[in-house]
Amino acid sequence: MSRQILEYHETIGYRFIPNIKARVLHESGGYLVRANGSGFRCNHEFIAERRPGWRRVLLFGDSFSAGDGVSNEKRYGDLLETLIPNLQVYNFALPGTGTDQQYLAYRECAAGIEHDALLTSVLVENIRRVVARYRMYSDDKGQAVVYAKPYFELENGALKLRNVQPARDPIPIAQMEKHEQELIYRGGRFQPLRKLVSALGLREITQRLSGYQPLPEYDRADSPAWLLMRAILQEWTRAHSKPVIVMPIPLHQYVEQTASPTAYQQRFRELATATGVALHDPLPDLLRYPAEQRRRFRFAKDVHPTPEGHAALAASLAPVLKSVLAGTEERP
C-alpha cells in the first residue's frame, strides 16, 4: 500500500487519515478502505468502556491484519466477529509497520480501552523490519521514496526507543550515507534475482531446489534481529494485564511449502515458554488445505491474503480465541 491514505504521526510514524473512506486500486479490482476517527482501519470507533455483555479483543499487526487487498469486512479480524457471538475486534493494524511500531501504537493509542484479550499478529517477516531505521514506500506517482521510522535498540539488555519524532518528509536516497542505506527495509532479500526468477515463472521451483530460506534471522536464538524482536514482544506481553495471544503469520513460502518453517516456529515456542503467552501457530491448520486451495490464499501478484486466505486464518484462530475468552469469564 502506498502512503496516499496515511498521515504523519509523531510517535508511530504514521496512521490512516482519520475517517477516510477510499477505494484503492488493486489486481482484485479494487477494495474499500474505511478508517475510524482514531486513524485506524476499523469499523468500530475506539471507545474506552466495553459494551455490556460483549467481549473485546485488541488486534495489532501490519498489512496482513490491516487487510491490504481486501475490504474491511473480509479481513480475518472482522470475520472473527461473525464466528464468535458478541465479539468486538478493535483493529489497530498498520500496513508497512514492524512489531516495534505496533508496540508503539499499543502504548500510544490503546491505553484505557477496556478489553478481554490482546492479539498480537506477527507477520514473520517483521523480524527484518524491527532492525530497519528507514522504510521504502511508493509515492502518488509510483516512485520509491524513503521515510525514517522510530525504532528500538538493545542496550545492556534493555530496550531504548530512538527517532521519535521521525522526520515528516521523505529522504532522498542519494543524500543518505552508505551505512544508512543498509538500514532501509526494502521488502525482501535478493530483490533483482527475485524479480528475474518471478518473471520467468520459475520462483517456486527455484526455491524448492535451492533450499531458499526467506528469513535466516530465525535460524539462531542469539541472532541480533531475533534478540531485538523477542525483547519487544517480551516487554509488550509481560506488562499486559489481560490474556495475550501471539500469532505468527507465515509467509506464502511456508504455506506453499517452498521453504521450511522450523526455525521461526522454534523461536516463537521459546518466546511462549519464556513469557507464558498463548501461542497460536496457524500454519498446521493452513497446511491441511489442498495445495491448489492454499495457492488461492494469496493474490496472483500481491502476496497479501485474499478473502479466502483471511477466512482460513479466521477459522484457525477462532477456536483458540474462544478458549482464551472463556477463561476470562467472570464466575459467580
Image (cartoon, rainbow, N blue to C red):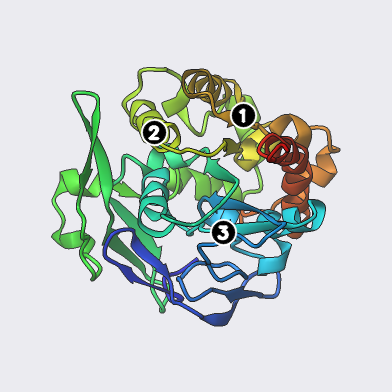
Q: Residue 126's image quarter?
A: top left
Q: In this orientation, does residue 152 appear?
A: yes
What residue is pinned by disc 1?
Answer: 259
Q: Earlier in the sequence, mark 3 or mark 1?
A: 3
Q: Quick check: 19 left or right of 200? A: left
- Of residues 290 and 124, the one nearer the viewer is 124
What residue is pinned by disc 3?
Answer: 91
* Residue 3 x, y percent position in the rendering: 41, 71
Q: Amino acid at mark 1?
A: Ala
Q: Residue furthest front?
A: 332
Against 329, residue 47 (above or below) is: below
Q: Residue at x 19, y 52 (%)?
A: 163
Q: Residue at x 51, y 81 (%)?
A: 20
Q: Residues within 10 Å of mark 1 (few under 14, many from 20)?
A: many
Q: Amino acid at mark 3?
A: Asn
Q: Residues within 10 Å of mark 3 (few under 14, many from 20)?
A: many
Q: Earlier in the sequence, mark 1 or mark 2?
A: 2
Q: Earlier in the sequence, mark 2 or mark 3?
A: 3
Q: CA distance from mark 3 to mark 1?
A: 30 Å
Q: Quick check: 154 left or right of 212? A: left
Q: Residues within 10 Å of mark 2 (few under 14, many from 20)?
A: many
Against 330, residue 264 (above or below) is: above
Kind of element beneath mark 2: helix
Between disc 1 and disc 2, the foreground one is 2
* Residue 63 x, y percent position in the rendering: 54, 56
